[in-house]
Amino acid sequence: MLEKEIERLSEKIIIKACESKSIISTAESCTGGLIGSSITSIPGSSSAYDRGFITYSNQSKCDLFDIDMELINKYGAVSKEIAILMAEGALKFSKATITASVTGVAGPGGGTKINPVGRVHMGIAIKNKKTKHSCFTFEDKGRNNIRKLTTLKALEGLYENI
């Protein structure tokens, strides 16, 4: 069910992005590339998708987006602040006009009181606009399910903002 919805939405994103001449990039942590993979599985995606950044480790967030490690230490990798910086970094270091970022706790371990398993922060950055932030907490239905639900939410965010 989730896979079909992800595929359907990815198709709609490519159509809408091509019509509006939007270029998409993604910055993914907890999804490990699922968002970019979903988009690029659609024929014609090369006209609308520039690149994906998989920044799974904290160091990769610093290396690829120039995020100061002190900010990650202060706010945590799973935070509003880091999700926004990831989305803005993907915009800065690509040809994109719109980006989506996700950082979260997919589980089964790693959850805390502040960031339980299933907590995800998402950023949507659009060229010359204020970056948007959303936070979701998915009921823990397993690591892969959380990753797919996160992918779906990111695709919805892209579609709504293209």
Image (tube, grey):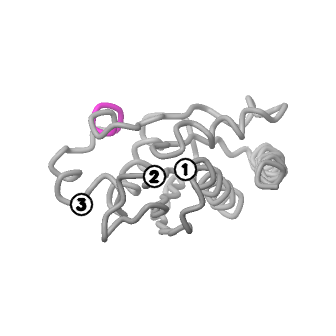
The picture quadrant where one finds residue 152 is bottom right
Amino acid carrying label 3: it is Tyr
Residue 143, labelled with which disc? 1
Asked if the residues shown at circle 1 and circle 2 are in contact, with their CB atoms under 8 angstroms apart, the answer is yes
Q: Residues within 10 Å of mark 3 (few under 14, many from 20)?
A: few
**Above or below 121: residue 109:** above
Label 3 SS: helix
Give the main secondary structure, helix, strand or loop, of the magenta stretch. Answer: helix
- What residue span does the magenta drawing correspond to? 61-65
Q: From the top left corner, tell me how far across and down residue 64 is, in percent.
A: 35, 32
Q: Earlier in the sequence, mark 3 or mark 1?
A: 3
Q: Residues within 10 Å of mark 1 (few under 14, many from 20)?
A: some
Amino acid carrying label 1: it is Arg
Q: Is residue 63 left or right of residue 5?
A: left
The picture quadrant where one finds residue 65 is top left
Q: From the top left corner, tell me how far across and down residue 148 is, in percent.
A: 65, 51
The Cα atoms of the two marked residues, 1 and 2, are separated by 5 Å
Label 2 SS: loop
Residue 19, labelled with which disc? none
Residue 75, labelled with which disc? 3
Q: Residue at x 39, y 52 (%)?
A: 109
Q: Quadrant of the C terminus?
A: bottom right
Q: Quadrant of the N terminus?
A: bottom right
Q: Residue at x 71, y 40 (%)?
A: 38
Q: Which residue is mark 2?
A: 107
